[in-house]
Image: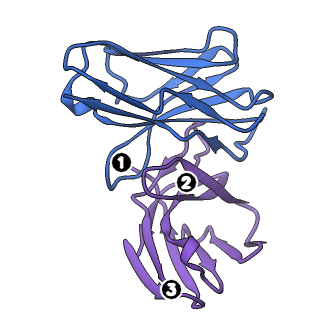
Amino acid sequence: SQQGEEDPQALSIQEGENATMNCSYKTSINNLQWYRQNSGRGLVHLILIRSNEREKHSGRLRVTLDTSKKSSSLLITASRAADTASYFCATDTNTGNQFYFGTGTSLTVIP
Amino acid sequence: DTGVSQNPRHKITKRGQNVTFRCDPISEHNRLYWYRQTLGQGPEFLTYFQNEAQLEKSRLLSDRFSAERPKGSFSTLEIQRTEQGDSAMYLCASSFGQGENTEAFFGQGTRLTVV
């Protein structure tokens, strides 16, 4: 079964608003990554946060990680129509080299 | 080097035919991954190479699937006797690392349609 699960499955907001997506996972991890995927395209790497980090920023993105709750959140501030995409979290594990993806959050930003 | 390159971008094949996809990773990356993604789902892990060694294979990778990375650079994924259930986007990713995983960068994918 997939390791990461994103919540909500779908999110629709107005341009300029903030968007928050959550990811929960099941087993201990070394790091967690967030990706964006535009319809029918490949995945674009957004940010990686390690298990010993609690918060990380990159431009309009803010990622938090709570290893005690096995969860992470991705905040996109001041959203733009171009942010419309699916967002996935990917977790590795202490035992393997593969990344596990959830089913993603579909974000729609309305101009 | 502009990133991970996958060819072809699209492939339509008849059921029972064999298909082969190619992935060219970012040049200095020693790790290479293959994933499969169906509509509305997240990518599912298929296999992982470190240099030329195939170190992990998913149970999703049936006997009809084979992957190679002969010189530790490009990789190929072959599907023999394709079935309609093989229709999906096949994604390749690469990264550089010796210990813990680092950022993995994905190609645009090869979309396979089996008719």
Q: Chain of mark 2?
A: A
Three-letter residue code for mark 2: Ala
Q: The numbered mark 1 sits on a residue in which chain? A: A
Circle 3 — which element? loop
Are the residues under badges 1 and 3 in a single subunit?
yes
Left of A93 or right of it: where is A56? right
In the image, what residue occupies the spot 55% across and 50% down?
A43
Give residue B69's quadrant in the image: top right
Identify which residue, A27 or B38, lies in the foreground: B38
Q: Earlier in the sequence, mark 3 or mark 2?
A: 2
Q: Which mark is residue A77?
A: none
Count of all numbered marks drawn on residues in the image? 3
Q: Earlier in the sequence, mark 2 or mark 1?
A: 1
Percent position of residue A21, x then y: 51, 76
Q: Which label belongs to residue A111?
A: 3
Amino acid carrying label 1: it is Ser
Q: Colour in which chain B is shown?
A: blue
The residue indicated by pointer 2 is A90
